[in-house]
Amino acid sequence: MNPARTSTTAAMRPTRLLALSLLSLALAAALALAATATLQAIVHKPQAAVYARPDFAAPVVATLQRNAKVAVAGQEGLWFRLALDSGASGYVRVTEVRMAGTGTAPPETLRVLFTGRAGKGRVSETAGVRGLDESDLRGAAFDAAQLAQLEGYRATPEAAAAYAARQRWSATKIAWAGETVPRGGKTSQANARLGTSVARGLLGSLGGGTVGSVLGAGEKAIPKSEAELTGEELALGPLIAGRVLGARPLWNDAAAQRRVNLVGRWVASQSARPELPWAFGIVDTPEVNAFAAPGGYVLLTRGLYELIASDAELAGVLAHEINHVVQRDHYMVIHKQEMAAAAKELVSSQVAGGASLGESLARAYVEKHGAAIMLTGLDREAEYRADEIALVYLARAGINPLAYYAVLQKMSAFGPKSAGLAQLYKTHPPLDERLDRIDRRGYGALEPYTRRD
């Protein structure tokens, strides 16, 4: 044994013990604070029945009127526990009140209050901790090792179904009119462009106008086939996901990564595109956000994951992102706004050399812009649609759709000025507006599924 190394190791022990002691004290302080902390909320419905227990069969101990102020002291499933003026506790459904969103409670307090557990070794984090921003994603290098690790966590449909069975989730067939997926044509562009005169005509016209307008006209005349659309998505997905992981690595929690893949794959199996090679991961950053890259890649942040109280809530978060993939939302942003410039050179090489147009476009785009597309705001209607379809996916998966509503409620508790949600608010409609949309639309055919535990 090396005496010098033994001496150094021994000298380090007190420092490690001190660090562990400080961490334990911080954890205890956070738990104690959350045990006494409450969040202000306002009754959102004309009346709200307060039950003695989180159970519709329990006695009603109070009836609150619209706009009454209440104190939320915790969450149990799809119920918020209220601290009543009498000193007793009562329970209301998560849809009955709306968080005031003052943004004064530390993120750790919110995590403990809503989930009953503290973040792993990150008690000192605050909402001011810097998360992912556009410069990070634009400048990050592709990380092949991290991407391989992400893909290594993929769950098979069979494994996901077995996990769902253990949760007592049963798949249910539910049709939904708003689920129409944009599809490609039957004839591929490659076949349509076998005549080089078409390609020469397109390239020759590039000098006379903007690339975007000419390419747009060309693509209306020669639409991509479904196979070509899918091929481009599958080329883009890993390239973008690898850049995101180059900016922030996967969270070093294998159990959490396996869990998110099992839950995510089960929900994706209820979508209109279950055949995609779905891959899910948790990125190690404290902010609250999630990303959907083309081709079936879904990433959520550790900050959001640690706010989630159940598999059902996790399923809700993933369901929203899954629909963005299903609807090709980010792919269409890339295709319409950015790829036209790259196509100026790549169309000719495609015709002449027979290379994969989708792969060439994907690589050219990502080399220039990195993964910044993940922070490009989608049309608001696309976000509202993803919220709506998320509820459908949950019902199909055997899960109460209100689990997704509960997550939106908890996120709104941070407040619109929270640094932890800064990027989310840049790319999404305000959370109150999203919740209002759900309330106004109602649940319709999904109503029976909102009574599930």
Image (cartoon, rainbow, N blue to C red):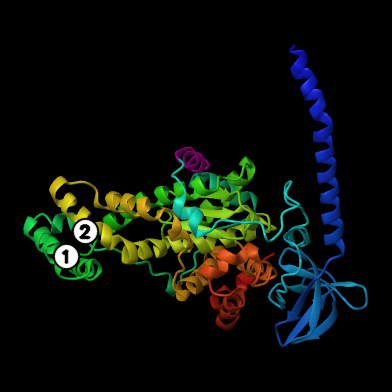
Q: Residues within 10 Å of mark 2 (few under 14, many from 20)?
A: some
Identify the magenta region.
Answer: 144-153
Q: Amino acid at mark 2?
A: Lys
Q: Is residue 71 above or below residue 64?
A: above
Residue 99 colored magenta? no
For disc 1, the marked residue is 206
Which residue is at 13% across, 63% downward? 202
Q: Residue furthest right?
A: 86
Q: Nearer the viewer, residue 422 or 334?
A: 422
Q: Nearer the viewer, residue 142 or 58?
A: 142
Magenta span dominant secondary structure? helix
Q: Residue furthest top?
A: 1
Which residue is at 17% across, 68% downward? 221
Q: Amino acid at mark 1?
A: Leu
Q: Is residue 298 visible?
A: yes
Say whether marks 1 and 2 touch (CB < 8 Å): yes
Q: Quadrant of residue 45?
A: bottom right
